[in-house]
């Protein structure tokens, strides 16, 4: 039998050579790569080396025993009696090597390379989850391949029912056994025992969160630390005795008393919240992006989600812990929202906000905003969400449609704020519907928005008279489009952004909300952009509310708000109307506007 | 001599962008990307993946991402669960620690590729592993690289695998 060679071959890399003189030790060698986790090593072996011999070599190299070695090639375990060539291992192939630890690992428990150190007694964790001291011995019998440690123990075989009698003595006896102590100090075994006990498994089936707790080794460790004190155990036993349900002692125990227990519970509460809200979101159509991008006018129900998707991307750039905390925050807001009102729309609104938080962090290369803006946005949304929930006016609660408008207008207000601060965002918003936008415009828009006196313009636009004027211009252009389209190119410079050129339908946007409806932009840009399809603005406008609303006269649309304003004492009908137009039907904002204009 | 057990190995592929990448990548990057892929290996009725929290596992489809967008059959393996978990433990201590996570160079797909090769000898489809270089070859990707480098992905819903005792 040829034996393994450990010098570099004089043969060509192919490994096989048939024409050489019969020096059998060097006749055919193979270079295999042995890959361990974190390590890569070349080995030169003879072609017909058996796996066993190879393992000998490896064990010498890696300083471990042969039976700790597991060789894997192409997903197949290599058995000792095979030869390498039999398994098809030729030059250049990679064999994977796993070095088993001395004690086998099991399920998803950690494998400990060190023998458990004999620490002070951890206490009988049985009393935590089970009423029997027999857990250990019972599960010992269930794990046939456990190490010698168990075989040596002479733990008393206490029956489950007997535990209620003379518990403390039995427990004391058990705890004193040094073998048991050693056992208990090994986290992995403890976890195994806990999870394999039938009572525990029943508990886990009913409350899956418990398995989370077990998997969190920190909690387990703390739990075991807590149980070290026999006095604690006795106290727990006493409280447990009168418990009506001995099979679920975790409930009576009260996780709050365990340090770190609150964390575990809060985690499970968050998880539960998240799942619940996820399910809530589903009835409204899983993917809010599709409606936006498909160019359909989304239903009013989805107006809020379509505005929110950009925020989702920005938000995703927060580090994950923040996502959880904000999700928790939103969860509480939204659960509040769910409980305080019955309007499905609002629930949708708030739930979509919170579910945005729950989506996993995207590594999308689309948005590139500093997180400062994200927090700003989240604050705004916070305000929006709380405003919509805490709104005290009964009227709003009774009128879902009204509240929706308010919701969307509040969102629009927040959006505008954000867009003013983030021109990149504005660019992105525009891109969502316009594949044909060229790069030049892409780059210009951010700087343009930055440079222009955006805030001044917006303030100017909120002036009802100015907005009326713009409205009239738009109406005129729209009329022109329908009556004499041939004239449109002549007025193209003036119609940029107003969407009249290619919008055959009457849905042109309300100019007050969108920053790029500015008539005084430079001529060159306008001509470039005059072919911007009205679909963008259609979308934007539809984002702001139901398109059909724009067709009605403001008086009709806002009649309800007008009534409420009148009832509040704002007698100036005309001013009320202007304010309502400016704020798109948002009574609260209209009130603020009116008060401001009246010199408060 | 009993025949060895063969365990199927699957690759779960998730599109993190939920379809957005397919629509927006031509605009933003100038080239078509079908998705932003996150992958995990499913074997022995468990799903294993790598994120900024290290190697994690969960029931198949059990992360917050939900069910996978596609499932690729990688092959089958004789490696038992026990050996596999040993392997993952040592991977988690050496090559795939949580802090080693890098969105471009050493991400979930790197891990899936590594594990797939260990289990079956086969690699995962190249469109997944080529994604980072595809992105980086665009000017947009290059420009955003510092930001993207700092992104850490950890799909919630998994439990850590292979951590030393007492730490989480």
Image: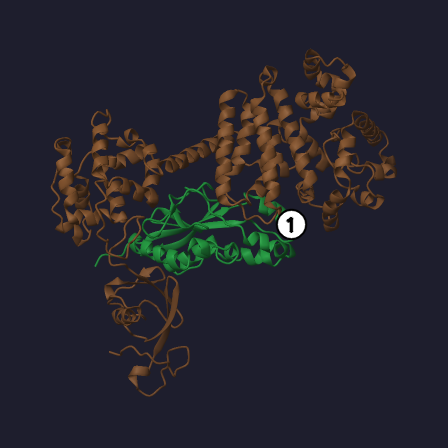
Chain colours: A brown, B green
Q: Position of residue A59 (x, y in %)?
A: 27, 69
Q: Please give the residue where the numbered disc 1 appears in the rendered image.
A: B28
- Residue A499 placement, left or right of B107: right
Q: Is residue B134 above or below residue A587?
A: below
At horizontal 66% and vertical 49% (from top left) the residue drawn is: B27
Q: Residues within 10 Å of mark 1 (few under 14, many from 20)?
A: many
Can residue A110 be seen here? The reply is yes
Q: Position of residue A446 (x, y in %)?
A: 72, 45
Q: Is residue A39 above or below residue A572?
A: below
Q: Is residue A386 above or below residue B82?
A: above
- Pick the residue in front: A522 or A69: A522
- Pick the residue in front: A467 or B57: A467
At horizontal 63% and vertical 36% (from top left) the residue drawn is: A292
- Residue A551 placement, left or right of B8: right
Name the quadrant of the N terminus of chain B.
bottom left
- Residue B7 placement, left or right of A515: left
């Amino acid at each position: 039998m040829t034996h393994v060679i450990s010098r570099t071959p004089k043969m060509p890399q192919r490994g096989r050579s048939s024409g050489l003189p019969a020096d059998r030790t060097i006749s055919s060698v193979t270079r295999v790569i042995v890959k361990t986790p974190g390590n890569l090593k070349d080995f030169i072996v003879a072609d017909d080396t058996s796996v066993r011999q190879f393992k000998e070599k490896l064990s010498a190299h890696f300083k471990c025993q042969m039976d700790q070695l597991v060789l894997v090639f192409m997903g197949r375990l290599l058995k000792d009696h095979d030869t390498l060539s039999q398994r098809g291992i030729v030059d250049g192939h990679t064999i994977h090597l796993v070095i088993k630890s001395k004690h086998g690992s099991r399920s998803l428990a950690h494998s400990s390379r060190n023998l458990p150190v004999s620490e002070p007694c951890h206490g009988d964790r049985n009393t935590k989850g089970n009423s029997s001291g027999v857990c250990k011995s019972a599960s010992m019998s269930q794990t046939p391949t456990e190490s010698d440690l168990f075989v040596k123990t002479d733990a008393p075989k206490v029956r489950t029912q007997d535990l209620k009698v003379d518990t403390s003595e039995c427990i004391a006896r058990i705890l004193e056994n040094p073998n048991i102590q050693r056992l208990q100090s090994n986290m992995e075994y403890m976890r195994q025992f806990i999870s394999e006990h039938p009572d525990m498994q029943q508990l886990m089936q009913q409350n899956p969160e418990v398995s989370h707790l077990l998997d969190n080794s920190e909690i387990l460790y703390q739990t075991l630390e807590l149980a070290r004190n026999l006095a604690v155990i006795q106290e727990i036993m006493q409280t447990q005795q009168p418990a009506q349900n001995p099979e679920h002692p975790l409930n009576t125990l009260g996780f709050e008393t365990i340090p770190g227990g609150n964390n575990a519970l809060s985690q499970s509460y968050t998880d539960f919240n998240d799942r619940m809200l996820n399910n809530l979101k589903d009835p409204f159509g899983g993917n809010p992006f599709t409606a936006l991008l498909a160019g359909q006018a989304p239903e009013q129900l989805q107006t809020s989600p379509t505005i929110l998707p950009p925020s989702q991307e920005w938000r995703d750039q927060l580090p994950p812990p923040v996502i959880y905390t904000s999700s928790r925050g939103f969860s509480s807001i939204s659960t509040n929202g769910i409980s305080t009102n019955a309007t499905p729309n609002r629930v949708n609104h708030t739930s979509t906000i919170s579910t945005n938080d729950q989506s996993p962090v995207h590594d999308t290369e689309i948005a590139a905003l500093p997180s400062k803006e994200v927090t700003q946005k989240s604050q705004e949304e916070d305000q929006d969400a709380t405003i919509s929930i805490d709104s005290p006016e009964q009227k709003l609660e009774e009128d879902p449609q009204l509240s929706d408008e308010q919701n969307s207008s509040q969102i629009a207000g927040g959006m505008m704020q954000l867009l003013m601060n983030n021109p990149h965002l504005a660019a992105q918003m525009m891109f969502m519907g316009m594949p044909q936008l060229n790069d030049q415009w892409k780059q210009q828009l951010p700087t343009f928005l930055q440079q222009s006196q955006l805030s001044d313009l917006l303030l100017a636009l909120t002036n009802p008279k100015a907005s009326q004027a713009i409205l009239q211009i738009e109406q005129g252009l729209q009329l022109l489009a329908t009556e004499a389209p041939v004239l449109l190119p002549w007025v193209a410079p003036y119609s940029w952004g107003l969407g009249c050129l290619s919008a055959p339908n009457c849905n042109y946007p309300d100019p007050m909300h969108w920053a790029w409806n500015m008539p005084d932009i430079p001529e060159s840009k306008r001509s470039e952009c005059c072919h911007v399809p009205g679909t963008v603005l259609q979308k934007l406008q539809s984002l702001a509310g139901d398109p059909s609303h724009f067709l009605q006269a403001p008086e009709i649309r806002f009649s309800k708000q007008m009534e409420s304003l009148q009832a509040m004492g704002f007698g100036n009908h005309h001013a009320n109307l202007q304010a309502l137009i400016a704020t798109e039907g948002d009574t609260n904002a209209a009130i603020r506007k009116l008060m401001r204009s009246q010199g408060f | 001599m009993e025949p060895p057990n063969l365990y199927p190995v699957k690759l779960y592929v998730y599109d993190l962008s939920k379809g957005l990448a397919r629509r927006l990548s031509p605009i933003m990057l100038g080239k078509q990307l079908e998705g932003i892929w996150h992958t995990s290996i499913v074997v022995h009725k468990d799903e294993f993946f790598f994120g900024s929290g290290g190697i994690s596992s969960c029931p198949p489809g059990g992360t917050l991402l939900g069910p996978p967008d596609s499932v690729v059959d990688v092959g089958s393996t004789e490696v038992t669960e026990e050996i596999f978990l040993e392997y993952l433990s040592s991977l988690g201590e050496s090559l795939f620690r949580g802090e080693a996570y890098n969105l471009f160079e050493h991400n979930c797909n790197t891990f899936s590729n590594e594990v797939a090769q260990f289990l079956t000898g086969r690699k995962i489809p190249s469109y997944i592993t080529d994604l980072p270089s595809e992105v980086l070859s665009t000017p947009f990707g290059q420009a955003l690289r510092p930001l993207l480098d700092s992104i850490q992905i950890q799909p919630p819903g998994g439990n850590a695998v292979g951590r030393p005792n007492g730490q989480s």
